[in-house]
Image (cartoon, grey):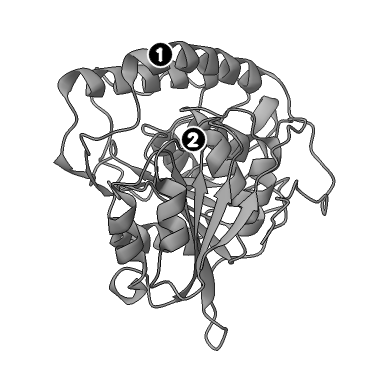
Amino acid sequence: MPTRGRARLEDSPVGMAESFELSRARESAWPSSDDRDPPPREGMPVPAHRVTIAVRRGLSFGALGRSRDLAGTSTRPEVRSSARQDGERRRELSVVAPAYNEERRLPALLERIAAPDSWAPASLSFRELIVVDDGSEDETVALLNRAAGLEGRLRVVELSRHRGKGAAVRAGLEAASGDLILLTDVDMSTPLRETAKLLAALDDGFDLVIGSRAVPGAELAARQHALRELLGKTCNRLLRLLTGIPYRDTQCGFKLLRTDVARRLAAHQRIEGYLYDAELCLIALQLGFRVAEVPVRWSHDPDSRVRLLRSAPRVVLDLLMLGRLARRPLRREPEGTPAPTVDARR
């Protein structure tokens, strides 16, 4: 039977630091003239292709006008490498899936997760699936309580009311016990086998790897309706203008990060709705973590839980909040400061 818990979410102070984002794409993969990155705001990293050229010239960029030697001392938080050395144990992977009224789509996810040899890289050991129920009104929780086949590796965290996908993700980040955390949507719009692509970037030294539908190499097997796609691109454009973050697709739900990094990001997370992904990327940059944007395969599911008209007011408010957070220096917490935890009742 799955273990169950009650999530407790808290806010934390926010602060500012420097960061870089290095692109794995070829240098020739520049954006088109009508879709270039907006000018970066002061204190935020320049887009990936510009950083790549700068590094090759031996230059360095820093937040708030500061600079550093890329080969020397950095203000980046001290974190352990995710790369596995020969002879070390396989790293354990926690999969976190937020769920809201997902009784129809959950069975396919549970069946797929239960066969990790078919999707998980050989260097990882599947530890657990954490499904965070965001106050569902259907039989989602009942289905999870009846689920079999994961041999004690299914954990259920219930929020007391419907708060939003961001709140559910934060609870999952806090509850995870593996070495790495994979964030995925219940509909598996990005196939789980794409985990290997994200892991390769993590092992190259990045701290947070985000799947992207908008960088060269991405494959859109089934596209969204033209209106949804236009609104999504418009939202991303506004996001980059307001915050200066360089990523072309923060809203893809497929992400991989180390658990120690996840704890620090969750401690600062405030947005509980649709734009939580963008906030995680912004916090990561402000804390000095390295973020990679990796192309993935993606298919639109018509049974999306995002309702455009109903979500619009909250998205606008979250955009404004992100703009304010981007301009407000984060206060760094001392190393070793514990992140908020989930009060789990088994």
The answer to whether 158 appears left or right of 26 in the picture is right
Q: Secondary structure at mark 1?
A: helix
Q: Position of residue 133 (x, y in %)?
A: 50, 44
Q: Quadrant of residue 109?
A: bottom left
**Residue, x 21% and y 38% (percent of image)?**
300
Q: Is residue 284 visible?
A: yes
Q: Is residue 59 visible?
A: no
**Residue, x 16% and y 34% (percent of image)?**
223
**Residue, x 36% and y 60% (percent of image)?**
195
Vertically, is 333 above or below 131? above
Observer-nearest residue: 163 or 17?
163
Q: Give me the C-alpha separation between circle 1 and circle 2.
A: 15 Å
The answer to whether 220 appears left or right of 281 in the picture is left
Which amino acid is tagged 1?
Answer: Ala
Observer-nearest residue: 64 or 238?
238
Q: Residue 272, labelled with which disc?
A: none
Q: Residue 165, labelled with which disc?
A: 2
**Mark 1 lies on residue:** 312
Observer-nearest residue: 78 or 131?
131
